[in-house]
Image (tube, coloured by chain):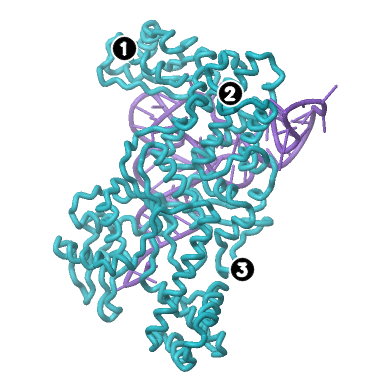
Chain colours: A cyan, B purple
Amino acid sequence: MSADPLKRALLAAARSVGAPETTDVILERPRDPSFGDWTTNLAMTLAKPLGRKPRDIAQALSDALDLGAAGVAKVEIAGPGFMNFRLDPGAQAAGIARIVDDAAHWGRSNVGAGKRANVEFVSANPTGPLHVGHGRQAALGDAIATLLEWTGWSVMREFYYNDAGTQIENLAKSVWIRMAQQLGIEVAIPEGGYNGEYIKEIAAAVIADKGDELILAHVREGAEAISAGRRPADAPLFDRLRLEAVAALRREQDLDMQAFGVKFDTYFLESSLYTDGKVTQTVEALVKGGHTFEDGGALFLRTTDFGDDKDRVMRKSAAKGGDFTYFVPDVAYHVGKWERGFTRAINVQGADHHSTVTRVRAGLQALEMGIPPGYPEYVLHQMVTVMKGGEEVKISKRAGSYVTVRDLIDWVGRDAVRYFFLMRKGDSQLVFDVDLARSQSEENPVYYIQMAHARMSGIFRNWGGDVAAIRGADADLSQLAEPEAQLLVKALLDFPAMVEGAAQALEPHRVATWLLETARLAHTWYHKHHVLGEPEPIMRARLVLARATQLSLAAGLSLLGIGAPERM
RNA sequence: GCGCGAGUAGCUCAGCUGGAUAGAGCGUCGGCCUCCGGAGCCGAAGGUCGUGGGUUCGAAUCCCGCCUCGCGCACCA
């Protein structure tokens, strides 16, 4: 029994005592279960419009309430005017019939009504393997996208490659230097260069592949130029190295995401914004709109008109190279998202990028093209600390200076990595305990939840019947009257509302919390009450509950991209 | 200094958008293996919700001040 019949009955009761047409009924789960199954503060909110005491109103509402229609066994008035409802246990348990009868839609809703949302996440520069922060973004972004899909949005998962700009230039220079070193030339990696193992691998691959064409004198000249802070004279070779390096790292990052089970619909290249002319178009539109000015040879956008604390440079002065700063393509990129028809754009990023939020939005507002001020939305997450053997891990062999997503997956497996990244809300810092994630014991929440699912599956294995054919009508669900069964039933019936709330708040951790709690209730019920070997009516009812539990746990796990094993 | 985030049990964290006696996991202590998987279950102890004010019937939750920690404050991305 969901809250809906109760809500309708209360609304009718409210009308009959003279409540305004606009009255809304808010039902909540009481914090303390001994207060009942549902509670409402309706009488208190009606106190002012009706000019009566809350407790009197509560009594009048209680008298007017159609208990049968509401599925309520008992109403209590408590405290300043709360109304507590205890549902009829049979009526409540009957609610789980719809879980097993229509498993494919359980937990899904349609508030998004097919509107288009773009979820952009990871968006790493192709300059190195993905680090743990990207892992958190991947887990968050993928889960948020799934949550939106479950609530009726049409979602595109997008990865934005910053494949233009200074960092890529540094990447190419680093590869050049490693190549030179491997050819016997003595040079050092310059300031700001990359020095992970993977750079050596790329350099070695280039030599192996194109060794015959390499002109040693050019390599030497380039190495010296890079050391002196310039570009190599052999521009075609430098270009080639850049492309090789970017391609190699994109392959590597793709493999990382594949290992993590994350699939993107679109890979968007920053460089395409330049080749398509979108960047210059955006700049022209901004200049035309009158929100720009020049100072010291640089072109500024007056972002302070839109809440920024200082104006930002769009195009550097000639003395600084005359390039656009990164946020210009970023604005052009988001114009593109809007033009592609995404009424929502959600960006999942590390909190260290939060300064870009105001800037990008300011750029979009300055264009005055009707984009809402809150576009795009941002989900920013705090830093991740990796702990192993009681100590913080900072170094990865391949990447050199940071722990990679691949390291984590290798250590603890995909499911545990996903869960650990999602069990905390994004805006709190996360301690990733590798030893805990790896342990196959009750301490590990992932195993605990998966075990609950496996146990339900185990019941069906021993039963031997056709699990998929189990229907609510096969059983008298009022048999599920024990406290342990009722608590589990309530948790299961909360699932759709939980999903909707998590989707609306863009907070996948609510799913993780729900899973852990529901798994606990499932273990407790399983331990206390047997399914098989009980009298037929009881067994039938418990099979339905076990099936509803199995389906709900599997649904919650799949929302987070985690497997639901039939056996452990 | 300014902006953003965090501060809740010994530890790691929830707290459903302002509700009743603030919860979970781990850890600690104490129980439970003839039982659909003990990779488990049950119970107990444990908190001045960083701090000082304010808003109201009611605050961990909203507002202001202060303290601590993290991140960011480029003509880098």
Compute the Cα span from label 3 to label 1: 71 Å
Identify which residue is drawn at 49% across, 45% down: A425
First-in-chain label (2 vs 3)? 3
In space, the residues marked 2 and 3 are separated at their CA atoms by 49 Å
Q: What residue type is labelled 3?
A: Lys
Q: Is residue A487 above or below residue A224?
A: above
Letter of the chain that mark 3 sits on in the rendering: A
- Residue A66 in picture, x, y percent from top left: 39, 8
Which chain's residue wears label 1?
Answer: A
| Residue B39 on image: x %, y % | 72, 38
Of tags 2 and 1, the one toward the viewer is 2
User: Does label 1 lie on the same chain as label 3?
Assistant: yes
Image quadrant in which you'd find residue A538: top right
Residue A545, numbered label: 2
Q: Could you tell me which secondary element the residue under label 1 belongs to?
A: loop
Residue A360 in sight here: yes
Q: Which residue is drawn at 55% across and 44% down?
A: A562
What amino acid is at disc 2? Answer: Leu
Instruction: Look at 62% across and 21% down and name the residue there.
Output: A542
Q: In this view, does A452 lie to the left or right of A338?
A: right
Compare marks 3 and 1 and give the one earlier in the sequence.
1
The residue to which callout 3 is attached is: A397
Near mark 3 (Cα within 10 A), the count class, few <14, some 14-19 or many ≥20, is few
Q: Where is residue A218 in the image (x, y as percent from the top left)?
A: 44, 91
- Which residue is at the far top? A63
Marks 2, 3 in one chain: yes
The quarter of the displayed image where residue B46 is located: top right
Quadrant hosting residue A447: top right
**Residue with the mark numbered 1:** A52
User: What is the C-alpha distance between the residues marked 2 and 1?
Assistant: 44 Å
